[in-house]
Image (cartoon, rainbow, N blue to C red):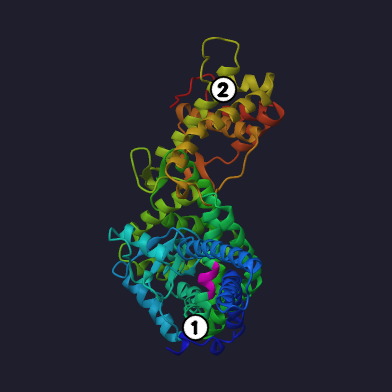
């Protein structure tokens, strides 16, 4: 194809010049490494022809030869590390052509229209982003072979030398976007395969990725002498590499101008909306489940519900729900449910650090069972923790009753800070074995994108008091645990969400004023003196 070798055609010839500048850094580094050897060769030749006679020159020649041998040895090791170090490969859900023939057909049609090579494969990421990823590095081929159960060095077509990059698509896009919207959003991404195929750009990218991987290897294996020159070379080519990537992006955007350009503006609005809903779903809905060893098995399907709810609440999103009558992009998959489950498990690993496979202490949960198996259990676990902390602060040697009244009295009459501090300490101690278990699974099992920022002791106390009150409402007033797609666990009284509870709990925790909460309990019919069922 004409699009595989020329960047000038797509309006960004500067990308190649920047790539050549990066490669000049590599050539100069090689020249510096070979310089002592070249000087040694000259001195040895001069000695052999008799032009440098005498003992002083013999000593100089031996010293230079020793230095040259040392530099060649060190340079050879450094070059081997740069060539063999595995660049970071984003964890993704592989998507074979047999599992998504219509999606592969859509992507190939895009590539044909823009006259660029088609991506060698498609994979999904549990995030709101899409990009091209080169997986032709030898280490990637070995890793792909192990994942596929083949021999070392085996792998799919994406790992063959010279293969086009892999197209990585954000899985929330497939469930929320319509087919035409997804096509418009993917056009400039797919167009990037053209510049990526240029040999100078491919070499420059490979050099930079190798240096970046060498820095990581040097840091992890305490080989500072390898990391130091790699960092130096990265600094020398950083500006040119960044400008090269800008040129490549401009080239891809320019080539994609003629493909669904008008629709792309509206589709980008859907990208922003999807990101907002996805973030709320992860932090408010998925995180409580992950913490108790459960992972929602269909997060992407939840995105549709969350964004539909967001569209209903937000006047800026008016009219977006009318799109739902059009064909969703997940129809391009043969088994969307299985793909959603795999992406949901990967999301738990990336954002929370959960195991890579389901197990007895790490099991999936369906949305229909979420209120009972996650929300109710979360509330009762937190209520038990609150009452245990209160027992620890009590002068009595025997545990007191597990009632709301006991907490109301304590927070009205005693210090709120002592209880908050105790809770913070208990939570920190509970987190230690969890972190140790994650560390035991390897560095790649730790969360790559932590979701939650540290919270104050009073915030934690308010959450636990709220949980205790919700448990009492379920036990004595006929309330039910519920799920709000944007806010997570909620309390339903007579089938209606009660959003007025949190403020009254804050009045108790912040000001020691139990009046508003007591009024609420009386209104709903909660018996504050009745013991609460705990986990």
Task: Determine the residue located farthest toward the right in the rendered image.
Answer: 511
Cα distance in 3D space between marks 2 and 1? 61 Å
Viewer-side residue, 235 vs 450:
235
Is residue 18 shown above or below 460? Answer: below
Is residue 234 something that shows in the picture? no
Query: Which residue in the structure is indicated by mark 2?
Result: 389
Residue located 55% across and 31% down the image: 427
First of labels 2, 1 by sequence position: 1
What stretch of residues is rendered in magenta?
A: 204-208
Viewer-side residue, 133 vs 377:
133
- Disc 1, SS: loop
Is residue 351 shown above or below 386? Answer: below
Residue located 51% across and 14% down the image: 399
Instruction: Write down the quadrant of residue 71 in the picture.
Output: bottom right
Query: Which residue in the structure is indicated by mark 1?
Result: 259
Viewer-side residue, 107 vs 10:
10
Return the x and y of residue 227 as percentages of the image width and height: 58, 57
Return the x and y of residue 343 as percentages of the image width and height: 40, 56
């Amino acid at each position: 194809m004409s699009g595989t070798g020329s960047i000038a055609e797509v309006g960004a010839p500067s990308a190649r010049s920047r790539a050549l500048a990066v490669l000049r850094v590599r050539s100069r580094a090689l020249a510096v490494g070979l310089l002592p050897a070249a000087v040694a060769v000259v001195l040895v030749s001069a000695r052999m022809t008799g032009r440098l006679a005498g003992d002083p020159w013999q000593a100089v020649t031996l010293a230079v030869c020793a230095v040259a041998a040392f530099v060649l040895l060190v340079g050879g090791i450094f070059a081997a590390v740069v060539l063999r170090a595995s660049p970071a490969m984003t964890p993704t859900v592989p998507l074979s052509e047999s599992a998504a023939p219509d999606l592969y057909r859509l992507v190939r049609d895009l590539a044909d229209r823009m006259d660029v090579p088609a991506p060698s494969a498609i994979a999904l990421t549990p995030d709101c982003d899409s990009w091209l990823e080169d997986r032709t590095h030898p280490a990637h081929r070995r890793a792909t072979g192990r994942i596929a159960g083949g021999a070392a060095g085996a792998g799919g077509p994406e790992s063959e030398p010279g293969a086009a990059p892999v197209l990585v698509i954000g899985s929330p896009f497939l469930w929320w976007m319509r087919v035409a919207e997804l096509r418009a959003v993917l056009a400039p991404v797919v167009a990037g395969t053209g510049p990526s195929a240029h040999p100078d750009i491919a070499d420059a990218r490979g050099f930079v990725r190798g240096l970046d991987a060498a820095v990581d290897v040097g840091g992890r294996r305490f080989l500072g002498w390898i990391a130091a020159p790699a960092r130096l070379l990265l600094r020398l080519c950083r500006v040119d590499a960044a400008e090269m990537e800008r040129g490549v992006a401009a080239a891809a955007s320019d080539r994609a101008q003629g493909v669904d350009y008008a629709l792309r503006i509206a589709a980008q609005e859907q990208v922003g909306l999807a990101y907002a809903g996805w973030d709320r779903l992860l932090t408010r809905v998925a995180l409580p489940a992950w913490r108790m060893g459960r992972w929602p098995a269909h997060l992407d399907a939840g995105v549709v519900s969350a964004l539909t709810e967001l569209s209903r609440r937000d006047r800026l999103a008016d009219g977006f729900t009318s799109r739902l009558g059009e064909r969703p992009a997940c129809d391009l998959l043969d088994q969307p449910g299985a793909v959603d489950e795999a992406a949901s498990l990967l999301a738990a690993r990336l954002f929370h650090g959960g195991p890579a496979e389901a197990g007895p202490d790490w099991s999936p949960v369906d949305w229909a069972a979420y209120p009972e198996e996650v929300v109710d259990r979360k509330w009762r676990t937190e209520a038990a923790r609150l009452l245990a902390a209160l027992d620890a602060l009590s002068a009595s040697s025997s545990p007191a009753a597990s009632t709301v009244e006991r907490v109301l009295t304590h927070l009205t009459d005693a210090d709120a800070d002592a209880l908050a501090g105790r809770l913070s300490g208990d939570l920190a101690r509970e987190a230690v074995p969890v972190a140790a278990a994650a560390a035991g699974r390897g560095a790649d099992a730790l969360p790559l994108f932590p979701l939650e920022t540290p919270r104050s002791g009073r915030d934690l106390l308010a959450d636990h008091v709220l949980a205790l009150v919700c448990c009492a409402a379920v036990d004595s007033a006929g309330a039910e645990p519920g799920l709000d797609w944007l806010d997570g666990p909620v309390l339903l009284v007579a089938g209606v969400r009660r959003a007025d509870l949190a403020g009254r709990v804050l009045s108790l925790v912040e000001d020691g004023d139990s009046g508003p909460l007591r009024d609420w309990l009386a209104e709903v019919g909660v018996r504050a003196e009745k013991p609460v069922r705990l986990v």
